[in-house]
Amino acid sequence: MNRNFSLSTTQVTWLIVASAPVGINTLPRVLNEQTQQTGWLFLMASALLVYLFMRIIIILPARYPGQTIFEISSHVLGRWVGGLFILFVTVMMILGTGLSLRLLADGVINYILFHTPRFAVIFSMLMVVIYALSRGVETIAYINEIFQPLILLSMTLILLLVINKADFSELTPILSDEMNIAQGAAASFYPYVFILTIVYFFPYIKDHTVLKRGLIFGIITILWIVIKLFILSVTLFGTVELNYIEYPSIEFARLIQFPILERFHILYLIYWVIYSFTVHTVSLHVGATGINYFMPKAPLMTGVLIASVIAVSFSLYPDNIERVREYATYLNYVNTGLVFMAFPLLVLIDTIKRKVKPQ
Amino acid sequence: MKKPGPIDTRVMLIQQQLGNTEDFKVRRFQTLYGQKGALIYINNISDPKEINRLIFPRIYEEGKTQILQSRWIQETLPLREIEVTDDDAKIVENLLLGKVILMLEQDPDVCVFQAENFPFRQPEQPTVETTVKGTKEGFVESLSTNIALIRRYVPEKDLQVEHMEAGSLTKTKVALVYLNHVHLPEVLEEVKQRLKSIETDSILSSSEIKQWIEDNEWSIFPASRLTERPDSAAQSINDGKIAILTQNSPFAILVPFTFFETIQNMDDYYEKWYVSSMIRLVRLIAFFISIFLPGLYVALIHYNPGLIPSDLLVSIAQSRTQVPFPVIWELLIMEVTIEIFREAGIRLPKPLGQTVGIVGGIVIGESAVQANLVSPITLIVVAITTMASFSSPQYSMAYSFRLLRFLLIGAAGMMGLYGFILGSLVLTVHLASQKSFGIPYLSPFAPAQYRNWIDQFIILPLRWRNVKPSYLTKKKRKGDWKPLKRG
């Protein structure tokens, strides 16, 4: 691990943005099923809550500057419990990567490569991700600095191209009568399901202000992306039709009529593939780092290969997209629990230990 | 037979080291006081006329009444540079550099006079980096002339020149030129260390040194820039870069080098800002075309024709009906053919090279289309791509672009648009992981240095352009240097 490298605020921001899973493309439908047109309010509330809880979690690197999350959790919970805790988080990240790969593969096969085996799509993406991981954290930070602004730009361009077709009266009344608050809240946390990946980058963030700024900018950027996707999906398709659209963001790209290009949504898929690459790079890095914690003498690439095998196996396991969605829901619950309970609890235990036995 | 005296013995010892070469010349003489001496040089590379004109009259006068000593000659003769040594190895070394040796009886030392007379051409218009409004003089093969040219462009007291040697056999002189108050000390130290670590017999050109000191020898992207224009070198030195000049090479190596400098040229600053900005944007478009167009063409024609407008698609389909090859083979055949023509065009004499271009480009291209070996649209794609690849002002980057095309054609041929995107991702990851002497290759975009974003694609008016690249001007203490990780 090259601990001399230090992340900047911009890099932390983009790494947090890269933690928003690929499934945010299906989020408008899932959220609409539970909350109807009120979904955007849920998204704002969940962003605020996630920010508050993450602010609690980032007390840890302020207390243990320069230390990895493994070192911190071992210090707070003891070697065995801390190790098991990190193993659990790591496995969740790898499984999340697997599901994300599967969602990507299904999307690619549906829209671009109709006759290509799913394994080929997943494996080829994984090869590129492994290559990126072999170049180190610095490269991961740099590629996010290159791609994320372009992704944001292309999404904003799409917004501008379809906004004339949007019917904003679909957003009223603001509060829907048929919303399921509990399910809606759970769905609205989905964009932040991997936000804990940033804890694995703690040793590379030397200045705590950088982390604080990066966190707020990152969460605001994710919020902007998902709110825009949700509002556009609702205003373009309506709350009823939206329930039957598998990939709403791709479908509204279909509505774009561009003078030179036909089937603009296929171009939109380019953005989607690049975005998923950034997500997989960050999440698999986290998984590999976690595995390497248990094999301290092995090079990082050993962890990368083990994490990749697990992720590929899990990505091929579900029979159909419904299963993928089901597993993603469970994973969402677990990760929400990690953000709102497990990690804040870690901070609380550390605080109590410090009070009892001042360091 | 004359019995050899001490002078003859010493001359013989030197001659033995040089073998039986016939251009080894010895001019023996004796002063009026009776002291024997010898003037030694290698014919063709030394010009002893100046020595004859200035030294012999003095030796004649002073040698009437006393025994002469090398030290005395060094102190009293008004010549530009005289070195005194008693080291035989150093004497031979100086002889090979074209210097003249004065050896005197009863004196253990010898005088070394500068009298080099190597054939060098005068600065001429650059042949690779041609310019409309820029300087019409380029670097030449003489190191001292090249240093003089830079000194003329940068008459600054902080301009430093450090000499080193590379190649155990050729002992090629290398000069590092930089501005003391601007450059990054760790980059300079890294350059010196890498030059010292060159382990080879022969260094004959800047291009060889460039390869030896590169960060990653497996990367197809250059980690430094070659220029034959002194104004480019001077501007880079002003910005905090280090120029590496090599004896016998008309190219200066400029380090560090970042990827986005690929589309920048010194001429951009000689035009009005809006003209230069437009030219840079054209180069940027050409860069994208040269790398991505053939791959995208394969992906769209072979896998995703739905993206192409219907009218154009019908036209393309009609033109390809008679072509027996899949589009990827058609494209590869044409790309390889173009590479053959290009290589032949370079090797042939200039008038013949033009003929080959006409025959290759028009006659064979036209015939290939008529014989249905390739479709007209493929020919257009290959021609545009080839022209676009030469729009980069950095000549060596054009090679990288050409190689990358094949990577993306292969990726698109295997997995269509998805493969094309993955290929582009590999390319970006590779670029993001590269460094040039510790400076990230994608600076100032990754890592983002917003201050340096100006002057990358768009040039601002001159009075607003007073910012030096921050990644080049960060000043650190000299002791901070640690070896950088390559690659």
Image (cartoon, coloured by chain):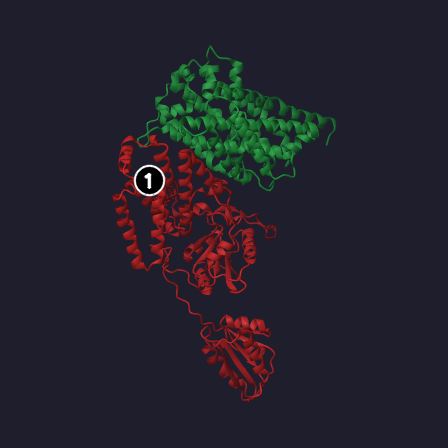
Chain colours: A green, B red
Q: Quadrant of the N terminus of chain B?
A: bottom right
Q: Is residue B55 above or below residue B255?
A: below
What residue does disc 1 label? B325
Q: Classify 10 Å Cα crowding around label 1: few (below 14), some (14-19), many (20 and above).
A: some
- Which residue lies at the image location 40% right of the left edge and 47% below the top edge? B402
Q: Is residue A235 above or below residue B301?
A: above
Q: Position of residue A37 (x, y in %)?
A: 44, 16
- Which residue lies at the image location 46% right of the left edge and 13% below the top edge? A175
- Which residue lies at the image location 43% right of the left edge and 23% below the top edge? A247
Task: Please give the chain letter of the residue carrying mark 1.
Answer: B
Q: Amino acid at mark 1?
A: Phe
Secondary structure at badge 1 equals loop
Q: Is residue B217 above or below residue A180?
A: below
| Whether residue B2 is visible | yes
- Report how many numbered discs are placed on residues in the image: 1
Q: Position of residue A348 (x, y in %)?
A: 66, 24
Which residue is at the far top?
A177
Q: Closest to the observer: A271 or B48?
A: A271
Q: Closest to the observer: B253 or B405?
A: B405
Q: Closest to the observer: A12 or B173?
A: B173
Q: Position of residue A81 (x, y in %)?
A: 69, 27
